[in-house]
Image (cartoon, helix red, strand yellow):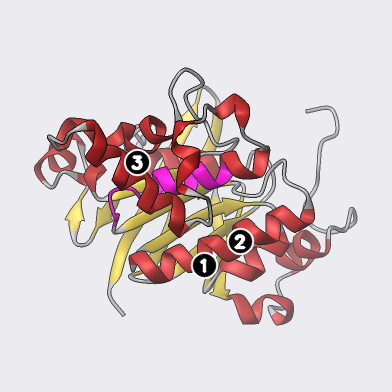
Amino acid sequence: MNKIIKIKELSKSFGNKKVLDELNLEVEKNTSMVIIGGSGTGKSVLIKSILGLLKPDNGEIYYDGFLLNEKSRKEIDFHSRIGMLFQGAALFDSLPVWENITFGIEKSRSLKNSDWKDLAADKLKKVGLDPSVIYLYPSELSGGMQKRVALARAIARDPELLFFDEPTTGLDPIMADIINNLINEVIREVGATAITITHDMESARKIANNISMLYKGKVIWTGKASEIDNSDNKYLDQFIKGKSVGPIKININD
């Protein structure tokens, strides 16, 4: 299958702390890749490097065959091709829902307010919310509704590539399952490739086609989601079963 993202020997350090260590990863087009791993293993730094929010020390990131750098991101208008669901939703408190949803695309289209509201209402329907919600402010929404609005914003541009940062954090198990189902639905409907970082194994199992595990800045296992319980990888086995004893050592003083 075609690789929409290909990462070669990516490294990133902060002072003396090496967060990514010659990391290699490939993501197949039109699939859902979930990246798992404990805190401090480099998941967020990896995503920020792909997005261009951080500049790696070494290595290469390719998007659909294009080597990504500051120049090429502008040439291919990379940021218009992606959508992002941030941890905690990250909605703008001072803006109503319809402006939150359309915020990232307003500069690229010239539409009347009524058209922006129609666009926002359409995206809300796709995430299971009533269009009347467009007039509310984030403070008037429950945590689950905020996540849905954030998901509507992520798909507002019908992106080719979707990023999800800990999409179920802070949600009760039922709402987390609803969000997981919605993620699966919007991935199918939009026809996008998805990259999710999470430590929630319930979520990973539900939304992933493929799973990669990071440990000490490297990908130590990649495979189908259906293979995760029979991997014979001791690090992966310890992580998915949440066992304190195993090759992964946690410094409780960190």
Report which residue position mark 1 lands on.
184
Q: Residues within 10 Å of mark 3 (few under 14, many from 20)?
A: some
Residue 221, visible in the rendered structure:
no
Q: Quadrant of the N terminus?
A: bottom left
- x and y, in percent, of residue 235 in the image: 73, 62
Residue 171, visible in the rendered structure:
yes
In the rendered structure, which amino acid carries the disc numbered 2? Asn
Dot 1 falls on a residue whose secondary structure is helix
In the rendered structure, which amino acid carries the disc numbered 3? Leu
Circle nearer the N terminus (2, 3): 3
Q: Residue at x 39, y 35 (%)?
A: 98
The stretch in magenta equals 147-159
Q: Residue at x 85, y 33 (%)?
A: 252
Q: Nearer the viewer, residue 116 or 72?
A: 116
Disc ID at residue 180: 2
The image shows residue 140, relative to residue 36, as above or below, that is above
Q: What secondary structure predominates along the stretch shown in magenta? A: helix
